Amino acid sequence: MARLPGGAIVLTAVLAALAGLLAGSFLNVCIHRLPRDISIVRPRSFCPSCRKPIAWYDNIPLLSYVILRGRCRSCGAAIPPRYPLVELATAALLAAAAVKL
C-alpha cells in the first residue's frame, strides 16, 4: 500500500479526529440514554440536571465543554468528565486508525 504525503496524512488524521469527536458525542448520548430507556433520537440533547434543552452552540463536542468550563449554561450543574473523555478517546482512536491505514 502506498504511503500518503505528509500533508495528506495530517489532513486525514484531523478529519478522522473530527469524525471521532462527533462519534464520541453520539456514544455519550447512547451511554446516558439507553440504560434509562430514553430514545436516542428524541428529545434533543438536554441537561440531565435541569432537563433544559442544550442549544446547538453548547453541544459542540469537546469545545463546548471547555468554553462552559464543564458546567451547564442554564443551571450551572457540573457536566461529568466522562463526556469529554469519551469524545477525546474516540477522536484519538479514529485518527490513529486513519493514519495507520
Image: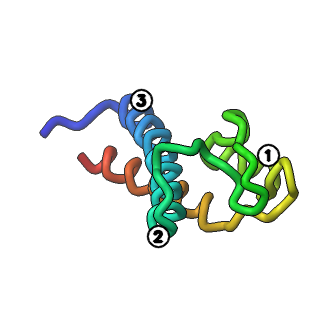
Which label belongs to residue 48? none
Write the residue at 78% across / 57% down. 50
Colour scheme of the rendered structure? rainbow
Which label belongs to residue 67? 1
The foreground one among 98 and 38 is 38
Q: CA distance from mark 3 to mark 1?
A: 29 Å
Q: Secondary structure at mark 2?
A: helix
Tell me the kind of residue under disc 3: Gly
Which label belongs to residue 35? 2
Write the residue at 44% across / 40% down. 19
Location of residue 11 (image quadrant)? top left
Residue 65 in percent (x, y) is at 72, 51
Single out the mark in the foreground, 3 or 1.
1
The foreground one among 83 and 45 is 45
Q: CA distance from mark 3 to mark 2?
A: 42 Å
Q: Earlier in the sequence, mark 2 or mark 1?
A: 2
Q: Is residue 94 above or below residue 57?
A: below
Which label belongs to residue 7? 3
How packed is label 1: few (under 14 Cα within 10 Å), some, or many (20 or more)? few
Q: Secondary structure at mark 1?
A: helix
**Given the current orientation, which residue lies at the most extreme left position?**
1
Question: Left of 8 or right of it: where is 77?
Answer: right
How packed is label 3: few (under 14 Cα within 10 Å), some, or many (20 or more)? few
